[in-house]
Amino acid sequence: MEVLKEKVEEEAATERAEAAERGEKLLRPLDARREEAPMTQEMLRDLEKKLSEIEIVVPEQPLTFTKDSIDISKLPLSYQSNTLKEEHLLQVADNFSRQYSHLCPDRVPLFLHPLNECEVPKFVSTTIRPTLMPYPELYNWDSCAQFVSDFLSMVPLPDPLKPHQKGNCFDFSTLLCSMLIGAGYDAYCINGYGSQDICHMDLTRDVCPLTMKHKEMVQEEEKVPSKKYAIKPPRDLSSRFEQEQEMKKQEEMKGQEEKQRREEEARLLEVEKANIDPLHGLRVHSWVVVLSGKREVPESFFIDPFTARSYSTQDDHFLGIESLWNHKNYWINMQDCWNGCKDLIFDLGDPVRWEYLLLGTDKSHLSLTEEEDDGMNDNDDVENLGKEDEDKSFDMPPSWVEQIEISPEAFETRCPSGKKVIQYKRAKLEKWAPYLNNNGLVCRLTTYEDLECTKTLEIKEWYQNREDMLELKHINKSTGLNIDYFKPGHPQALRAHSYVSMQPEMDRVMEFYETARVDGLVKREETPSSMTEHYRGRSDFLSYRHVDFGPRVKKLALNSAESNPRPVVKITERFSRNPEKPADEDVAERTFLIQEERIQLRYHCRDDHITASKREFLRRTEVDSKGNKIIMTPDMCISFEVEPMEHTKKLLYQYEAMMKLRNEEKLSRHQAWESELEVLEILKLQEEEDDAHTLAISIYDTKRNEKSKEYREAMERVMHEEHLRQVEAQLDYLAPFLAQLPPGNKLTRWQAMCVKEECLSDFKQRLIDKANLIQARFEKETQELQKKQQWYQENQVTLTAEDEDWYLSYCSQAMFRIRILEQRLNRHKEQAPLKYLALEEKLHKDPRLVEFLKVFV
């Protein structure tokens, strides 16, 4: 409690000192105070004198054995040295390498233990650290490889004939292999040889995967068996001669196109042959192989860590394999690679094809033949063999690499600096981190017509976190057609928008999420003179509506299309079959000819009929020229009925039907007008969103959500101020001294002066005691460090590597503590006089002493 009290008092005094520096006159000038209170100044000088007598001497830096370029405080011990087991493994690897070089003198030296960042040899298998990332997106191999490809920056090998330089393919492969093994795959790092393109991450000869169109499975329609009394199709009266001539022309055009394509391919092959790689087959490359078996992998395949693309084990880009390894063992390829990797068999349990380093491998050996099995039935031989294997077995040491951790910020940013550009054949792919661009752009694919990438063909842009839910924008430069794709959540449930111009009443096609709309609208097609809408799942069974517009009537005050809509000329609506109604009464199509004042109806056809009923109404004015109401006449309704019924011939039935159709015509015209307004609203919303670039931020994203961030900071500020007020209220610096006075008596002037002097004297002594305590701790740490240094000098010859590591670690920690104590003492010396003056000022303003101390101010 005393330490806590000291800490609180120290923080409070520090804040008052800072307030004094900001101009808040909590402390009076030192010169004035000396004139007014010489006794106080004398005590202050005495305090400064005693504090100045306390001195410390920082010892010299202890002896270290690390290089100047390595900071010990930032690197773990496993990076700077090897354990006894790792040293034993290096000896085994060196012995294995000598035997291999003796038996295979024509092979290159093995890639076993390169130097790490501290120039300490580390076995390659111990560099792999199997790690399962906490992100579900990194559980499958394709997304995991894509993340590694985007997350790291490729640095080519300075010497293409030697492996392992910083930021190269080996670093990519090691990280990818660690993540794949952690996700449950049977993955291995490979040291081999690759083509020039794959070693330099040159994709200018490859087609971008995003431009490849997936082959759609075409389902063959089942042929409906022909009916016996079906209607015969009409005869084909077209000329066969003309058809043959047309087919010849098409074949000639295809032949010319094929010829041009072959000539272009031949030209490209000649250009590629002219640039023959002089180091073909010698360029060192590292990649990852995933063997079949685990995670339901049906067939083994390669993964290039630079591009995250998967390849067959027989691909021409991979020209040979020297060795491969995982976190458990190391295998050497003993197969001939004259034909690249096409003939290699990845059965690591076959010691003839793959020579292993350690016996402790999880790959079972091939089964022995019957003769070999009979020769090993002797129990003694089996026991001796088991003892010999047990003696020679050696487990792989644990990885020396720290736990692989990827923060959410780094996982979201992915690409270095938040941006990455990849050049493909006739295409360029650009990637950005989310929220890096104000408009939410995260990816752009630009395709070109020529190999020089000068003529743009089309652009595809992918977006994230848009408030208008825009996901993809497809721009065709040759036709000028733009297609915007939206995710679910758009205010109008828009799915896709195809247009050439953003001006209203132009050619455009809008597709919608029909399940998110009340009216079930699926698609809307608009031209300058018409609008077509398709519906699905409506209660009135409406499936189609086509509206034809006439020329707009000019107005003097023309503000917008909303105030002066286009006149409707014709409305055509189609309905799906309503099973609750008879086919003769279920309307299939109705047409409102508004200018001609006619309504045409076509009903559904019954299954046992080949024609459908039709009816046409002639609309007339309700009153004549004299104002008399016109009565329904038979010539106002023209009908064709497959099976005439009596009630349909009555004028009352026809009159009621016509009045109902007139109301539905008004409703259809109103819905067409609302559709025009909705188009204008969508265009306006899209234009505002393109100008504003407003991105949606989750409430859980506390770093980007400014409102929640400001609210949280305000709440923390209020809580901190409240805590300071409570602490200050609980601390009564005069309570111990006032308790010594007789209770119940009024405080006198002499007693007030005594309380003040005792409080200042006690506070001065506490400051001196604190300085002495810091000095005592400093001297103790210094003595212990000197003892350890003397012990090290005496036993330096007999110390083991682990003892030296322990000594270096202790020296580093001791020097850290000594520096901290030195800083604390210097800061205490600087702040002690200010704290003393702050307490004196507070005593002069204390309401219990202010009446008695006015005379001395």
Image: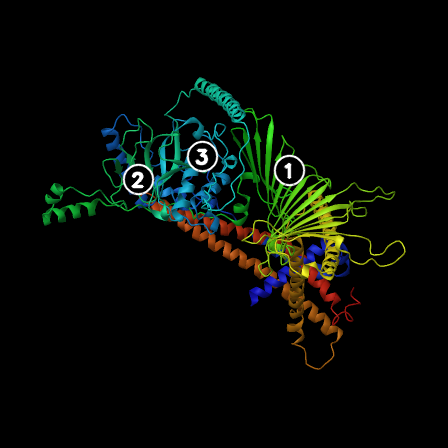
Between 753 and 169, the one nearer to me in the picture:
169
Q: Quadrant of residue 172?
A: top left
Query: Considering only vertical position in the picture, is 289 above or below 699?
Result: above
Q: Which residue is mark 1?
A: 482
Between 541 and 555, the one nearer to me in the picture:
541
Element type at mark 2 = strand
Percent position (x, y) of residue 577? 59, 55
N-terminal label among 3 and 1: 3
Q: Which residue is mark 3?
A: 166
Query: Considering only vertical position in the picture, is 632 above or below 457?
Result: below
Q: Name which residue lies at 30% across and 33% down.
A: 344
Q: Quadrant of residue 189?
A: top left
Between 21 and 226, the one nearer to me in the picture:
226
Q: Name the amino acid, label 2.
A: Tyr
148 on left or right of 12: left
Q: Quadrant of the N terminus?
A: bottom right
Crowd around label 2: few <14 · some 14–19 · many ≥20 (10 Å): many
> Is residue 26 visible in the rendered structure shown here?
no
> Is residue 375 visible in the rendered structure shown here?
yes
**Residue 330: mark:** 2
Q: Name which residue lies at 77% across and 52% down.
A: 619
Between 796 and 475, the one nearer to me in the picture:
475
Q: Give the colour scheme of this rendering.
A: rainbow
Mark 3 against mark 1, which lies toward the viewer?
A: 1
The Cα atoms of the two marked residues, 2 and 3, are separated by 22 Å
Percent position (x, y) of residue 62? 44, 44
Percent position (x, y) of residue 75? 45, 44
